[in-house]
Amino acid sequence: MRRVIIVDYNLGNIFSLKNACERVGLDVTVSADPVKIRGCHQLVLPGVGAFGVAVENLKQLDLIDPVIEHAKQGKPLVGICLGLQLLFSRSEEFGNNLGLDLIPGVVKRFPDVQDGEKLRIPHVGWNVLNRNASGSSDPLFFHLNEDPYAYFVHSYYVEPIDPSIITAVTEYHGFRFCAAIRKDNIVGMQFHPEKSGPKGLKMLANILNGVW
């Protein structure tokens, strides 16, 4: 069994994620220790909160370099919700904040109005994941016979420069946005698999059991 570290940078639902991992038989550790993070096989970067605060917390804990080094060494890295957004070049949340720049692209805020309808922000609730051509064959989703629903809580969405890394999109009142990405050894989800029922738990198990 592969040992997984969930990065603890003082933001997010870390222990509900840990409990979900353990429910599907995964051996996980929560840590903010740069030495342990550098030495592990697989990292999960979770998070719920503000992008700028998250980056500052990572800096204060000396975790930015270990996470970047981990990814550049080709080891598996998983970003969930805010954790996905942190992988990108920058975010427009409360100004212009630089991210880890492992995925070229920008984190943007939902528009206030879509097709004449005011969007309620944050986007909270269940939406279907529409797998695209690359996502339909992605091991993350291989156990699914149909596009699943997943649980979202966010006000910002990611926009990668390279659309070919997008494996699933979601519509929120007609506004389509990236819901999942895969780039080499990096997987990211805007939704919360740990809150997305049995199918979400299976996605976690697929990723963290080494389905790459």
Image: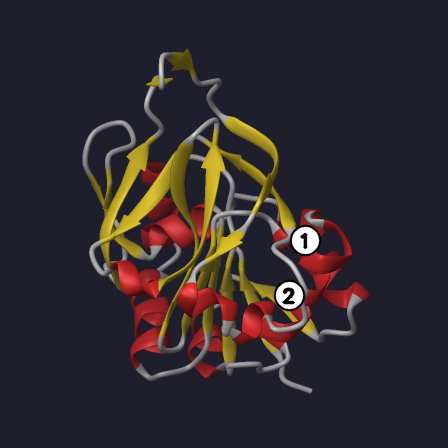
Q: Which residue lies under the disc numbered 1?
A: 194
Residue 146 spot, x, y in % from top left: 65, 59
Residue at 48%, 43% (x, y): give it. 170
**Quadrant into which the N terminus falls:** bottom right
Does 56 appear above or below 139? above
**Which residue is the site of mark 2?**
204
Find the distance from the CA under tag 1 to the CA under tag 2.
7 Å
Contact between marks 1 and 2 (CB within 8 A): the answer is yes
Q: Position of residue 163 (x, y in %)?
A: 27, 58
Residue occupying image coordinates x 57% and y 30%: 124
| Pick the front one: 60 or 23 | 23
Q: Residues within 10 Å of mark 2 (few under 14, many from 20)?
A: many
Q: Residues within 10 Å of mark 1 (few under 14, many from 20)?
A: many
Of the two numbered discs 1 and 2 on the same chain, state the one appearing first in sequence: 1
The disc labelled 2 sits on which kind of residue? Answer: Leu
Tell me what residue is drawn at x 51 percent, y 46 percent: 10
Residue type, label 1: Glu
Query: Depth check: 110 or 174 in front?
Result: 174
Say left or right for 14 vs 103. right
